[in-house]
Image (tube, coloured by chain):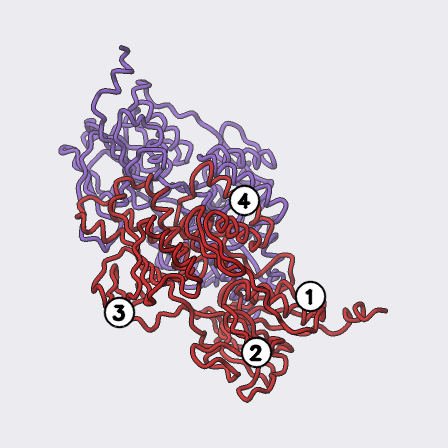
Chain colours: A red, B purple
Amino acid sequence: MSSNEGAKWLPRKDVIIIGSGWAGSTLATSLDETKHSITVISPETTTPYTPLLASAACGLYEFNLVETPIRHTNKKIKFVKAEVEGIDCKAKTVRCIPAFDDLSVKDFVLQYDIVVIAPGSTNNTFNTPGVSEHAVFLRNAKDAMKIASRIQDCFEKASISGLTDAQKHSLLHFVIVGAGPTGVEVSSELSDLFSSSYASLYPHLKPYVSIAVHDVANQVLSGFDTKPQDYAIGSFTKRNVEVLTGSHIERVEKNCLYTKENGKISAGLVIWATGNKSTALVDSLPVKKTPRNPRILTDSFLRVYTPSSELVDGAYAIGDAADVEDARLPTTAEVECQKAKYLAKALNGKIDREFRYQQAAIVAYLGQNDGVVSGKKDYSGPQAWIAWRSKNFLWTRTWRQKVLIVIGWALDLVTGRSIAPR
Amino acid sequence: MSSNEGAKWLPRKDVIIIGSGWAGSTLATSLDETKHSITVISPETTTPYTPLLASAACGLYEFNLVETPIRHTNKKIKFVKAEVEGIDCKAKTVRCIPAFDDLSVKDFVLQYDIVVIAPGSTNNTFNTPGVSEHAVFLRNAKDAMKIASRIQDCFEKASISGLTDAQKHSLLHFVIVGAGPTGVEVSSELSDLFSSSYASLYPHLKPYVSIAVHDVANQVLSGFDTKPQDYAIGSFTKRNVEVLTGSHIERVEKNCLYTKENGKISAGLVIWATGNKSTALVDSLPVKKTPRNPRILTDSFLRVYTPSSELVDGAYAIGDAADVEDARLPTTAEVECQKAKYLAKALNGKIDREFRYQQAAIVAYLGQNDGVVSGKKDYSGPQAWIAWRSKNFLWTRTWRQKVLIVIGWALDLVTGRSIAPR
């Protein structure tokens, strides 16, 4: 009998995965179910396809195509809808709080053999007053639906009889805070939406619509090379998207925001896309972390250290919340996926080498048929758009969704975009 | 020059349609745009495909397939998102209140040559305490999404560690109030969902799930013949759906309801489907109406009367909110559509005869591959299901949606139902 066949008869290890993002869900679906009993703990029941969210918010995809549920009919993954409050690395337990406030059970404890910490990150508001209440984020399908619905509301409000021109201009001014990839993608998609479907649906409002991207930095696409940065600026100019670099947001209120440079700016919608910060779990965990905006530091086998640099037994960290010591990897879906797939192979007993990242292109979509790609090589224009769209296609996991996305694209060509936001 | 060609050069008449349901939207899309300037006023931007809502709530259709937006890129229909508060039939104006409470404009007045009153109806709670707060309705796509999301929440809550068997039974008891077509459809779809997808996704919860249909009447499908009634009862028995006829609901509270006959009944979700009542607009309009739960009485040309039976100039009423004097027509989508199409032809100058209803089959879906049809002839079983599904197909208007529905059915067969409720 070979050692592989023998492995099937060993007791299965209890693997707890904290987080249902790219990292957690990729690991959960890649682990060998004959060797592991897998439990995913997360307050979210679905994994969002982050790179498609901006397109979905602007009606290019159905909302159900930009997320996939953790519970699969053909996978034996247990799921617990809860927030992990703490980990006892000695007792090998996690303490959870249900994601529902009307249950008699207020907290509970689960035992593990292996814990994988992948809670991701949360929105960074930089403590700017009013952001959580009055701005919208773009992290999951619910956010995308909210943005689609708020955009439609702005156009419907501006269609009501008796409003002044100034009021229409205010309602139809859309502000994106943050000129990173998400901000650039959202503003490009918004511009495309307003010049296509919405221009036909609300022809009476076309003269009142405007888009502005604000960033505290002095450039857009900070972290990219100058070539894509220049290309993005040129594309914004072509699309009449106003770019305000070096803009300091002081606070956000209902239907307006205040900047240090320009004072009060009225806006129908403020989309906040300034980046990520660590979760409460990562902030409180007594493990080795990076100093500011902490991420968990792992060794090159993705294992977690104590603060005094001893390895913690059976504890791993992947995703946005983790970084490999001395590696300085970007927080992208591609890095997350590569780490998750590596860890699955390692836990399945298929490899015993260290994790090595294979750099691929980072893509930011700059409107229909036009984009920039940075990474292995720089290139711009239609090729980048094709790379971006092919990537979307590869990233989408189930056959059902792949088929519907292709059909969706074909139907977009023939019948125009789908625009029934809820 | 023929009289038809001459008509194009007459000034267009301002037609105001109050309501965006089946009646209002069918009329709006059927009116001749060269003769009429069309404005639809409604607090809802979409028309729901009412007969598909139960299926959508249970994951058989995508939510965006069960509604269609009033604003079309290829139709010149003006839309105003507002509630009509009153009509001045002498001045020929309607007074509107915007469907947004944060606008400086609090009300406004629009002028008409022709007004068509089609505001539909609202949920009838029979003044039962707690229904609006704690039960859910099923009138539009938003309701269907809410039900899908609440069902999933119940199963996720019941999956949390540490709950007692009694608590799981309570969370997974689903109550439908009202055994009319909607109640019968929802309970059949729920039963199918729980025995298919949800049985695979939550195998640990199967023993705890139960469904009950309550009705104050002594029979299900009141208004149908005894044959479909008996068939429905048999089908419920086969599906283990408990039927409680003669059940008087006293009040609904969070996670429970109270009946006169059985006292407190714990439930994860209460779906309220007891029928319709008139809107505030119809209640307040000084026109000729039916006495109780008022509907507007029209002549056989669908024209509105004053209370003293004089015709009101340029005012028509269609849809659930209206009835033809001495005709006693049922409030179904088919009647609504026939009236709307008749009125469009009449206003377009294509016919001058009276409205006559062509009775068609009334269908209630009793679970996959099984149903009852009442109307011209009674038949049961798979043929009824085919009639029902073909009807869905015919009722769905745009080509995009038709194609996606067919593909959706095919994919359901191959990959299982789509179950990512938000």
> Mark 3 vs mark 4: same chain?
yes
Q: Quadrant of residue A353?
A: bottom right
Residue labelled with disc 1: A33
Precedes in sequence: disc 4 or disc 2: 2
**What is the chain identity of the residue bearing mark 3?**
A
Q: CA distance from mark 4 to mark 2?
A: 39 Å
x and y percentages locating residue B300 in the rendered image: 30, 24
Dot 3 falls on a residue whose secondary structure is strand
**What is the chain identity of the residue bearing mark 1?**
A
Q: Which numbered tag is attached to residue A406? A: 4
**What is the chain identity of the residue bearing mark 4?**
A
Residue labelled with disc 2: A298
Q: Residue drawn 43% across and 25% down?
A: B358
Residue labelled with disc 3: A250
Precedes in sequence: disc 3 or disc 4: 3
Seen from this angle, which residue lies furthest top? B1
- Picture quarter with the N terminus of chain B: top left
Dot 1 falls on a residue whose secondary structure is loop
Q: Is residue B380 visible?
A: yes
Q: CA distance from mark 2 to mark 3?
A: 37 Å
* Badge 3 amino acid: Glu
- Mark 4 or 2, closer to the camera: 2
* Badge 4 amino acid: Val
Is A306 situated above or below B244?
below
